Image (spheres, rainbow, N blue to C red):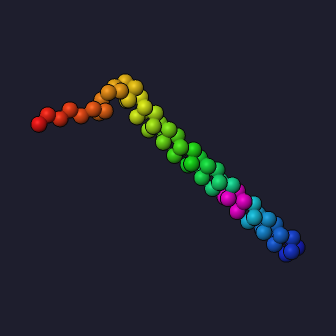
Amino acid sequence: MDIAAMSTRISQTNLREQVSIAVLKMAMDGTRSQAEDLVQILEESAKAMELSVQPDLGSNLDLYI
C-alpha cells in the first residue's frame, strides 16, 4: 500500500467534503434570504389588502371639544 497515494486520497476526500458543505451553506443562505423577502412581501400585501377593503378606516380622527 502506497502511503503517498493514500494520503492524497484522504486529502481529496476531505476537500470534497469541505466544498460540499460550503455549497450547502450557500444554498441555505440563499433560501433563507428568499424566505425573508417572501415574508416581507406577504406582510406588505396584507397591509395593502386591508387598506383596499376599508380605505377610510384609521385615516380620519374626529375630535369634539
Residue 15 image position (x, y, % from top left): 75, 64
Quadrant into which the N terminus falls: bottom right
**Depicted 58 relative to depicted 17: above or below:** above
Q: Nearer the viewer, residue 50 or 32?
A: 50
What residue span does the magenta drawing correspond to? Answer: 18-22
Residue 59 image position (x, y, % from top left): 31, 33
Residue 13, by quadrant, is bottom right
Can you name the residue that lies furthest to the left here? 65
**Depicted 56 relative to depicted 15: above or below:** above
Position of 41 with respect to 10 (left or right) is left
Identified at 78% across, 68% down, the residue is 10
Q: Nearer the viewer, residue 20 or 13?
A: 20
Quadrant into which the C terminus falls: top left
Position of 15 with respect to 43 (left or right) is right
Identified at 40% across, 26% down, the residue is 52
Identified at 73% across, 65% down, the residue is 14
Q: Nearer the viewer, residue 57 or 12?
A: 57
Position of 60 with respect to 44 (left or right) is left
User: Is 26 in the magenta?
Assistant: no
Q: Main structural element of the magenta stretch: helix, strand or loop?
A: helix
